[in-house]
Image: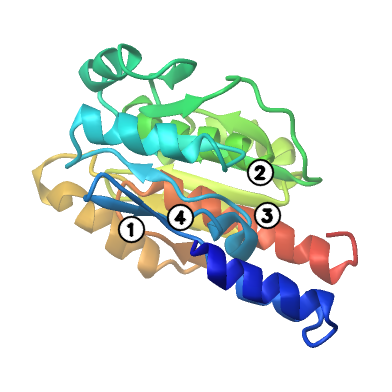
Amino acid sequence: MKPEALQSLLEAVASGNLPPEKALEELKHLAFEPVGGFAHIDHHRNLRTGFPEVIWGPGKTPDQIAEIMEVMRQRNPVVMATRIAPEVYDQLQERVKGLFYYREARICTLGLPAVEPTYPGKMGVICAGTADLPVAEEAAVTAQLCGFDVCRFWDIGVAGIHRLLAHREAIAACDVAIVVAGMEGALPSVVAGLVSCPTIAVPTSVGYGASFNGLAPLLTMLNSCAAGVGVVNIDNGFGAAILAGQILRTGLRLAGKG
């Protein structure tokens, strides 16, 4: 953020030439910070979207990730990096203080590992099989870091549908459902036919050869016969959690509570 731009904005508010609401809108798009010649940190994304910028781990060196985290920790309520492999986390520990690692989710954060819910509503994360857990945990941990209450339902795929039906009432009590499945990807369609809340389907790259690294479940979910199913990209647990959070926050705003 250029100091002169901020000063001009504040002077306009102080003189009464610019309403505070208008100034807030301008601030939402004002601040970013260059880091090391390889990144620009969007410090005001939290103002615009409700959640801070998140670091995508793959393709970045541990030194780059560490430098970005150190800059972000000064001005962001949550600093989070996704798809961090265990060996990368080991290197980050030597460079950044206060790290916590969610090994199953492959998420690295600064600050306390436990986050109390700050929003009403419950988010259900439903996982078809144990092999889908990394993507499901990515969704669950992201949602918790966003400030939402998360209820996990693991290994209840359609191959043993009685396992799903045993949790039917608890899943129906959720306000939004994230359903993670590989293989043929049938689980989201089944869940959406049982509950009244929005259902977000997440295909995973888990499956035998004809699943084509997640393309088969992706197409199944896109062609769901149950109404009200939204689909994110293959293995995108993070994106599903952010979308679910936006749904819940929009509901709060419409109810006059957010």
The residue drawn where x is 24% and y is 16% is 91
User: Left or right: 202 with respect to 116?
Assistant: left
Residue 188 locus on image (x, y percent): 48, 53
Task: Give the alpha-carbon distance from disc 2 to disc 4, as whole Å.
Answer: 13 Å
Q: Amino acid at mark 1?
A: Asn
The Cα–Cα distance between marks 3 and 4, rounded to whole angstroms, is: 14 Å
Q: Say whether disc 3 or disc 4 marks the residue closer to the N-terminus.
A: 3
Residue 29: image tag: none
- The residue under label 1 is 233
* Separation of residues labelled 2 and 3 (CA atoms): 13 Å
Q: Can you identify the residue that label 2 sits on? A: 123
Q: Is residue 77 shown left or right of residue 91?
A: right
Q: Earlier in the sequence, mark 1 or mark 4?
A: 4
User: Mark 2 falls on what kind of element?
Assistant: strand
Q: Which residue position is annotated with label 3?
A: 195
Query: Which tag is nearer the camera, tag 2 or tag 4?
Result: 2
Amino acid under label 3?
Answer: Val
Could you tell me the amino acid type at mark 2? Met
Tag 3 secondary structure: loop
Q: Secondary structure at mark 1?
A: loop
Q: Tag 4, which secondary structure?
A: strand
The total of numbered circles placed on residues is 4
- Kindly report the distance in space between the C-alpha atoms of the residues bearing marks 3 and 1: 22 Å
What percent of the width, then of the height, locates residue 2? 49, 64
**For mark 4, what is the residue?**
201
3D distance between C-alphas at marks 1 and 4: 9 Å
Q: Earlier in the sequence, mark 2 or mark 3?
A: 2
